[in-house]
Amino acid sequence: MPLNSPWRADFPGILALEAEGQTYLDSAATAQKPQAVLDALLDYYAGGAANVHRAQHLPGERATRAFEATRGKVAHWLNAAEASQVIFTRGATEAFNLLAYGLEAEFQAGDEIVVSAAEHHANLLPWQQLARRRGLELVVLPLDDRGLIDLEQAATLIGPRTRLLALSQLSNVLGVWQPLRELIALGQAQGALCVVDGAQGVVHGRHDLQALDCDFYVCSSHKLYGPDGVGLLYGRADALRRVRHWQFGGEMVQLADYQSAEFRAAPLGFEAGTPPIAGVIALGAALDYLAELDGAAVTGHEAALHAKLLAGLAARDGIQLLGAPRVALASFVVDGVHNADLAQLLTEQGIAVRAGHHCAMPLMQRLGLSGAVRVSLGLYNDGADLERFFAALDASLELLR
Ligand SMILES: Cc1ncc(COP(=O)(O)O)c(C=O)c1O
């Protein structure tokens, strides 16, 4: 089956890389952008840039309208109850740091924060550092062989001292959907806050945050076919009221004198300074683009490509898959071959995959690995990309073994 992507031509970056002899299989790190996103960036600057929420003049009013329209589109995309529950940050990483500082007053020495063994550093280190500042315990939920959080063990580890769960929806290494609803229910039974790292999950399918009922959900625009420099933090209204302001400056303030200030509520109270205006507006264009696609066709295409990827890896000797990935990516190691050597040879053949610890060093340590090679897919990839990857993989392994 050729597995052509009907959307490939919408992505100039993919076509440019292809013309250069590059096969892009690293969308879990960052996705290519559709033309509509490039147009939105250019339109904003070429049409007259202006700051948001400050000026009454026409360009300022136009920029503010487009900026706020994206907030509404994000809320709609994630089924948030209100647009005001969506905060724009400068990346997913910044959103986790915002929470780890903004929720600091919620914790007392001896309280516990629960993470899983599969967290990306972005959803681990802010909590680890908070734990060090406040004398808290960081509890790590173990995974089973597939990479799923073990629910039985989670039920014993999430207890009365648990104040917060910080869990990824879809691991960037293992590609498994965690049983979040069950885990959130375990946390809620203890009165704990639940933070979900949706950086990888948000890109695949649609997610209903009201049904998920987490307190916070974090993701970034650049993996969602939008520009980089923009992160999204969703908070349920009652949860957001518990977050203290953490960055101080323009626009987040209600009243200020030399000695004191009063701050705005969410979202603007958490968007100090000039936000990434062009990026936010262009993220709106990415969501418009995605909303117009046939979601079932995208999911079907991604599933067919993923099945081809897994089948190709399984057909080759000595390849060990990490976990049991369900969507869009596969990480693997090869017996007797260092992942960096393999990645180097793949790079020399124009295959853009990621190798190393994938910003999840503790997970790699737990798996007893120094790193792994990861292939990840976007909706623009097609069967020919995977065929080029497998041809390069075979040629590389021939040399390395
Ligand atoms: C699971 C996961 N969480 C968080 C992040 C951090 O996102 P960003 O680098 O956009 O801040 C990433 C990025 O790779 C990720 O894969």
Image (cartoon, helix red, strand yellow):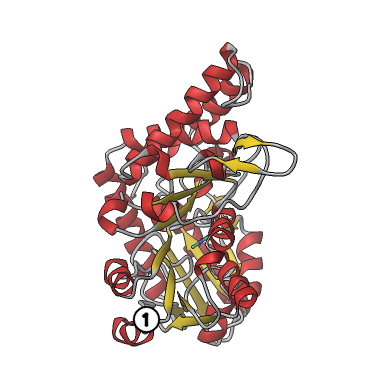
Residue type, mark 1 in image: Ile
In the image, taking residue 75 as reference, residue 96 lies left or right, namely right
**139 over 67 or under it: above or below:** below
| 247 lies above or below 227 | below
Inspect this view and state whether residue 377 appears.
no
Q: Which residue is mark 1?
A: 158
Q: Position of residue 182 (x, y in %)?
A: 27, 71
**Ligand 1 occupies quarter:** bottom right
Up/down of 394 relative to 136, above or below: above
Rendering coords of residue 288 (x, y %): 38, 32
Q: Position of residue 311 (x, y in %)?
A: 34, 69
* Circle 1: element type: loop
Question: Is residue 364 in view?
Answer: yes
Quadrant into which the C terminus falls: bottom right
Looking at the image, the residue that sits furthest to the top is 58
In the image, 47 versus 11, the foreground residue is: 47
**Quarter of the rendering containing residue 17:** top right
Q: Looking at the image, how many numbered discs can be counted on the residues?
A: 1
